[in-house]
Image: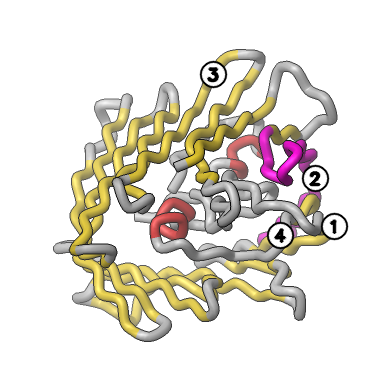
Amino acid sequence: MKKLHLLIGFLIGFTILACSSDDSSSDTNQETNRFYKKSEAYRNSSLVFDKTVNYNSNNKIQSILTNDYGYNTETITVTYSGNTITSINEIDEFDNPSNADRNVTYDVTIENNKITLESDDYTIEINHSNGYVNSTREFYPSNPNAFTEQIFTRDSNLNLVSNTTGDGSTFTYTDFDSDKMIDPFGSVMEYFYSDYFKIFDLKVTNSNPLTATYSQGSITDTYSQYLEYDELGYVIRTTFEPNSTTDYTEHEYIEL
């Protein structure tokens, strides 16, 4: 059901995990009509992961295609009535035959500060305000009291301070860039449903954090990421080691 953001895979031996997004980001510049299009992740100079976003004639996300090489491919397709999202279909096809493929369609309900995605199996709730995600909750309708939740907290500048996930993990964030566009891949941020946040044009932070601390029980780890920007302030490359030529992620944008 849940899919943690890709970057946690890089932190644990560069093992790529299934990615939801992300992000959760402000990828559009109103002056240039620039939109996030694609990310490619390389390990030991080999392409190991890519994500492509496609848009409809109204510049709304139509589909998101993700290939986590050696693990799975994922296709998310959005259905609209005018500019209103009515349903989202997600297909996951796993390379390992022991993993069952998934084909899930969510009916979407948007009301006030809550977005509800309901399928035949389970429900996802996204709680937000002023364009920022505050929390998400996932549960089986037959047992709504048994849920998985993630909670985001921000400072007075709307920068993400922490994210607590349902498995007891907590990520805290520091060292924020300013006056830059948000990393479409999430920088050092880890969270579920980043692709859904993109679809609903929701963010989790105002500026990119460069350092994160992960904790779960007695386990802690602090890590940083290096971001490169173009002349308009869009993130075009991310690495965990400065100037790495073998392990990095590149981002592309288009103008619509």
Residue drawn at point x = 68 percent, y = 65 percent: 206
Image location (x, y in percent) of residue 9: 59, 38
Lower sequence index among marks 1 and 2: 1
Q: CA distance from mark 4 to mark 2?
A: 15 Å
Amino acid on which disc 2 is placed: Ser
Instruction: Mark 3: give few (<14), some (14-19) or many (20+) Cα within 10 Å.
Output: some
The circle drawn on residue 175 is: 1
Choose between 210 and 217: the one closer to the eye: 210
Q: Secondary structure at mark 4?
A: strand
Circle 4 or circle 1, nearest the eye: 1
Question: What range of the chain is rendered magenta?
Answer: 213-236
Farthest residue, direction front: 31
| Residue at image mark 2 | 224
The CA span between labels 1 and 3 is: 29 Å
- Number of labels in the image equals 4
Q: Earlier in the sequence, mark 2 or mark 3?
A: 3
The answer to whether 107 appears left or right of 188 in the picture is left
Q: In the picture provided, is 20 more to the left or to the right than 107?
A: right
Q: Earlier in the sequence, mark 4 or mark 2?
A: 4
Residue tagged by mark 4? Answer: 215
Q: CA distance from mark 4 to mark 1?
A: 18 Å
- Residue 15 or residue 204, whichever sits in front: 204
Q: Label 3, on which residue? A: 47
Labels 3 and 4 touching (C-beta < 8 A): no
Snapshot colouring: secondary structure
Do tag 2 and tag 3 residues touch (Cβ < 8 Å)?
A: no
